[in-house]
Image: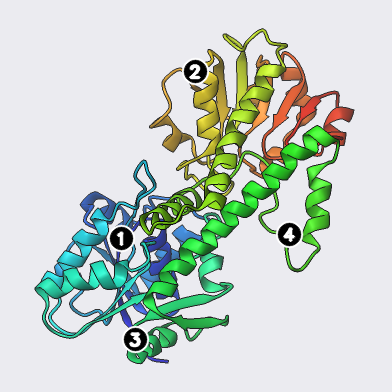
């Protein structure tokens, strides 16, 4: 198998994981970022994000000479045959993707390449951006040949390395058979279905996939809300639905809704893309609306537990701050949203998260008490709520938690715990769509 020289521009979540995994497959990889401080830390083995297994993989591939880091884009791309663009595309208030970083990188590539390259967008971009934006910008500066491709990522935080090396599928959008062949060879060691599409289809596949998953989560949350009114139990309903092969069990977990760096941004972007093309997507609007409602609803449940007396000066323990387990990412985290809502109502917040507290300290105000353990967080609190589905919250000593709380009340925003067991321990248990 031919080993490629790969340049990965951007050392955020997607760029760093992708670069390290390409190196682990035997390729020579240079990861590039304009943040010199970040690059120096990476050279020392200091990883800017928490992802299980990533630190060890970085150190191994650096030691074996396949992985390096550099802040000089111009010099770093010269020897690369394939250049991956992995910079952020944050969402504006109306959902439109901000493409400033994409434009800046395309400009730098155009100014610095000296021979034909394959330039691949892994960043999530609107349909048509590869051809109508990236390629056009590069062409302003470089008059020689180059190939543009789209290779969307489908990485889940917490399982990103496994998702890269053992994916459900690899999508490659190209304009020419030459680029398609080169990228298929790059992924030759990975055994999974690989599909070649147009650039536009590959870009849309990423948006459509994430929008579907977000909609599926909102659907089961809507069912959970109906279950609460009708006496059904959403966990049992989800099991019965998930056994249908046409539906599947994944993403049928009710709770506070979706968050993170991808699903919220991408479903808003697809809604904006639809509107920009003269189409109103009522389905996407509803999925977004239900997701927002879930956060409000959990706060209402907490308020109702105090019999309409309000929660001003009440102490509430919040377990979890990350948007999901096995990550320190707090972007669009429902847990963060709930903390802010409770504070606005006058509640005192004590919180614990295994990985995300340092990131949370940057955006939550100083009145939040960050604790070193779940037990410290719940001490003398009026109730405890689970806001992130960390598995270790299942394993803590809930009998001890009960004795530390002022009242044995748990609001399980992730349906993580067994309601029957909690009630047997003497807790008042409030879940999402649970009627046990």
Report which residue position mark 2 lands on: 344
- Assign a secondary structure to mark 1: loop
Residue drawn at x 23%, y 73% is 135
Report which residue position mark 3 lands on: 179
Q: CA distance from mark 1 to mark 3?
A: 22 Å
Is residue 108 rendered to the left or right of residue 282?
left
Mark sitting earlier along the chain (3/2): 3
Q: Are marks 2 and 4 in contact (CB under 8 Å)?
A: no
The image position of residue 299, as x and y in percent, is 62, 25
Q: Nearer the viewer, residue 303 or 77?
A: 303
Report which residue position mark 4 lands on: 249
The image position of residue 344, as x and y in percent, is 49, 18
Mark sitting earlier along the chain (4/3): 3
Q: CA distance from mark 2 to mark 4?
A: 37 Å
Quadrant where the C terminus is found in the figure: top right
Q: CA distance from mark 3 to mark 2?
A: 53 Å
Q: CA distance from mark 1 to mark 4?
A: 34 Å
Q: For mark 3, does the 10 Å Cα neighbourhood hold few (<14), some (14 to 19), or many (20 or more) residues?
A: many
Residue drawn at x 15%, y 75% is 139
Quadrant where the N terminus is found in the figure: bottom left
Q: Nearer the viewer, residue 133 or 375?
A: 133
Q: Are marks 1 and 4 in contact (CB under 8 Å)?
A: no
Q: Is residue 395 in view?
A: no
Mark sitting earlier along the chain (1/4): 1
The image position of residue 198, as x and y in percent, is 40, 79
Q: For mark 1, does the 10 Å Cα neighbourhood hold few (<14), some (14 to 19), or many (20 or more) residues?
A: many
Is residue 177 rendered to the left or right of residue 417?
left
- Assign a secondary structure to mark 3: helix
- Assign a secondary structure to mark 2: helix
Report which residue position mark 1 lands on: 10
Q: CA distance from mark 1 to mark 2?
A: 37 Å
């Amino acid at each position: 198998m031919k080993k490629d020289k790969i340049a990965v521009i951007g050392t955020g979540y997607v760029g760093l994981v992708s670069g390290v995994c390409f190196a682990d497959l035997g390729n020579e990889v240079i990861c590039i970022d304009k943040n010199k401080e970040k690059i120096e830390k990476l050279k020392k083995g200091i990883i800017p994000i928490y992802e299980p297994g990533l630190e060890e993989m970085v150190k191994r591939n650096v030691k074996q000479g396949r992985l390096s880091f550099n802040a000089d884009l111009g010099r770093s791309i010269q020897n690369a045959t394939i250049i991956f663009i992995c910079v952020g595309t944050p969402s504006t208030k109306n959902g439109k993707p901000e493409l400033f970083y994409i434009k800046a990188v395309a400009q730098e590539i155009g100014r610095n390449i000296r021979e034909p390259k394959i330039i691949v967008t892994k960043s999530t971009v609107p349909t048509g951006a590869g051809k109508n934006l990236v390629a056009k910008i590069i062409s302003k500066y470089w008059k020689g040949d180059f190939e543009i491709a789209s290779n969307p990522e489908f990485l889940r935080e917490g399982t990103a390395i496994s998702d890269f090396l053992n994916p459900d599928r690899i999508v490659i959008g190209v304009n020419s058979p030459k680029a398609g062949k080169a990228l298929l060879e790059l992924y030759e060691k990975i055994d999974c279905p690989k599909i070649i599409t147009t650039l536009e289809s590959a870009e849309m596949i990423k948006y459509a996939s994430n929008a579907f998953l977000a909609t599926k989560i909102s659907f089961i949350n809507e069912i959970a809300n109906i279950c609460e009114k009708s006496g059904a139990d959403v966990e049992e309903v989800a099991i019965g639905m998930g056994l249908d092969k046409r539906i599947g069990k994944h993403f049928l977990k009710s709770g506070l809704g979706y968050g993170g760096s991808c699903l919220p941004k991408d479903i808003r972007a697809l809604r904006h893309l639809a509107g920009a093309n003269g189409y109103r997507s009522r389905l996407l609007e509803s999925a977004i609306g239900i997701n927002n409602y879930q956060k409000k609803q959990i706060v209402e449940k907490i308020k109702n537990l105090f019999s309409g007396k309000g929660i001003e000066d009440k102490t509430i323990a919040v377990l979890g701050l990350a948007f999901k387990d096995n990550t320190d990412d707090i972007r669009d985290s429902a847990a963060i949203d709930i903390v802010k809502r409770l504070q606005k109502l006058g509640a005192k917040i004590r919180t614990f998260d295994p990985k995300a507290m340092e990131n949370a300290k940057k955006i939550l105000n100083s009145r939040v008490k960050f604790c070193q353990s779940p037990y410290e967080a719940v001490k003398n609190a009026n109730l405890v709520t689970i806001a992130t589905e960390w598995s270790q919250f299942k394993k803590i000593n809930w009998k001890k938690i009960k004795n530390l709380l002022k009242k044995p009340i748990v609001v399980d925003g992730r349906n993580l715990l067994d309601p029957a067991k909690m009630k047997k321990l003497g807790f008042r248990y409030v879940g999402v769509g649970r009627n046990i």
